Amino acid sequence: MKKVGTPEYDLSDKLKYHVSALSTAAKEMALPLNITTHYPRERKRQPDCFRGYMLFDPERCISCFQCSFVCPANAIWMKDAPSGRYYPTVDYGKCIFCHFCIDSCPGGALKTTKIHDVAYKTMDEMFTSTEEMIEPPEIIREDVGVVDYVIDKEDLSLKRTKEKDALIVDVEPSQGVPMVSVCVDRGSCLACKVCDRICESGAVSSVVEEATMTVKMAIDAEKCTGCGLCVKECSMQILRLVRK
Amino acid sequence: MATVTETGKGEAEWEVKIPEKKLKDRLFFENLKAMVIDTQMCSRCLTCVSICPSELIVNEEDIVDFPNYEEKCLDCGACVRVCPRYDYKPKSGLGDYMEFTAGKSKRFKGQDGAMGTEFIFSAIDMGLIDRGLFVDRDEQWRTSVFHVRGKEQLEKLPLGGTKYVFADILPELKKAVMFSKVGVGVVGTPCMVSGIRKLQEEFPVFREKVKLVVGLFCTENFHYNEVSKYLIEKGVDFSKLIKTDIMKGKFVATMTDDEVKFKVSQLTGILPSGCNVCTDFTAVESDVSVGSVGSVAGFSTTVVRTEAGKEIWDYIKKMGNAEVGEGKVEELDFLINHKKEREKNIKQ
């Protein structure tokens, strides 16, 4: 067995280290340096794609449930709105801020913000309704400056600027993997036209030809947003999402 | 009837052929209602319930109905496409068969030889199917359908045995077909077998997934509300009831301490109208037909009809899962003819 002992220093080493420690202490007394942000008087500048509090735009939502399906923490619960649609609600007690919901939203209805400091008094309050997600939450801003961390020559220093950082910015929505809906078992199609009725982008079409008693079904790959609504609604489960 | 024309443009464009409407300018469900339900032809096999994309056709108060169909019906014609009674071609007789025999399961206990259960489990053992549908009952003899995937599930449920009450097998069959990765096995009455064949004829997904259809010999089947009321009047206590059977023209309800017997002819009052036009006793369209008539007590008469049925029957014999008995074709003649006489009730 190998034992780890204390390193052995000779007298010159000990003197060198003591002088170094004393000089650092003297420097700090004269000119204090810190590498922490003085929150809430200062805020650290976050990148635009920061994963923070989420905002929701009902105009863009197609009620496809994709956000609630993809959520790994089961934090998103779809609730019925007076318009007959289903809109997401987020339980921030469960949310892990992975923002898979934002990345998977085909219509770009969910949006990230740089807000990360929302306080709740109870667990119940963390359950955020759809209405609360439309407008950003009320935040008391005491900050007067922004802090940027600058790394140069393997040394970390702080750059302080007197300005207020915008917490809500427009971010280019994530492109994701373009998907398109296809029918994998055309023989089992009932021609119930549910896919046509449900499609928001008008990609699915069904034309009844009375003369020959046939229904012509078609999916326009150009228009299809890959939201998967028709795939979920098809009662015969013959539609699939595939890569474009 | 092939329903799809290949347009050759990949998976993005296809055509579906819908049936002609007998009553023009009316919804398909109205056609079904006028032709089948209102004419007392409906056997309540529930094939339409299983296929309806809006899932709003229901079996309520012993009548198949679609509340508020004027607004909610999608008018796709699926119900008309699959209804075995819409263009009714009555089947009767013993039908084609490869082997007429009898069996008694060594592994399971049932009303007779438990051959229905044996066929499903042997098919699961062979890897031909991964799920079988069984009808279970509660203490009040109400039926419910179970998806069975292994033998261990059977120990908890009193599966075997005739209930003489309709069960919602076909709606469950669709669910099973959607879930199953290999195949599904199902036991049903002749009308249900016809419904399954019609589904298979129309939709490839059912052709692919429903691998085994065991038909039951069936003279008639009753609706729960009617038969329970009648049996309670006759003094049957459901909490003590062990089994029900029809033997030598008599309905026998065996209880733990008593037995109630009466002539089957007394039940004609509550005989469902759909059974009144049914001429199929032996489930002609099944892969294997099973029933108690035609073999000695304790054995089930087994009529192997198709290659799929033969394959499983050979497996059962090879593995020694069942004792092989002797089936007597002539014993079936009386009931086959009895049901054939119902042809005169069909007016179309």
Image (cartoon, coloured by chain):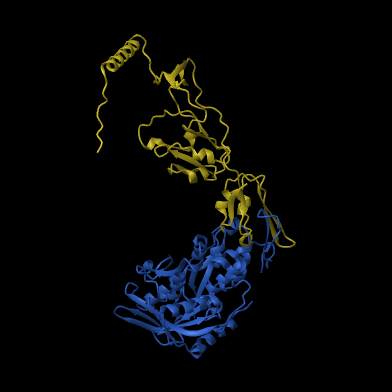
Chain colours: A yellow, B blue
Q: Is residue B220 visible?
A: no
Residue found at x 57% / y 48%: A228
Left of A188 or right of it: where is A138?
Answer: left
Residue A132 image point, x, y percent: 47, 34
Residue A174 % position (x, y): 56, 36
**Rendered residue at 58%/45% (across/down):** A227
* Direction from residue B138 to residue B327 in the image, left or right: right
* Residue located farthest toward the right when viewing the structure as drawn: A211
Residue B35: percent from left, percent from top: 62, 70
- Occupied quadrant, residue B305: bottom right
Quadrant in the rendering for residue A142: top left
B44 or A206: nearer the viewer: A206
| B289 is higher (above) or lower (below) than A168 | below
Q: Is residue B198 or residue B109 the one in the foreground?
A: B109
Residue pushed farthest bottom?
B330
**Residue shown at the point (35%, 11%) measured from the top left:** A27
Q: As displayed, is residue B154 above or below residue A98?
A: below
Identify the image quadrant of the N terminus of chain A: top left
Q: Is residue A122 visible?
A: yes
Image height check: is A97 above or below A21?
below
Count of numbered badges drawn on the protein: 0
Please indicate whether residue A214 sits to the left or right of residue A21 in the image: right
Place of residue B217 in the rendered image (x, y in percent of width and height, measured from the top left): 49, 80
- Residue B290 or residue B27, whichever sits in front: B290
Quarter of the rendering containing residue B340: bottom right
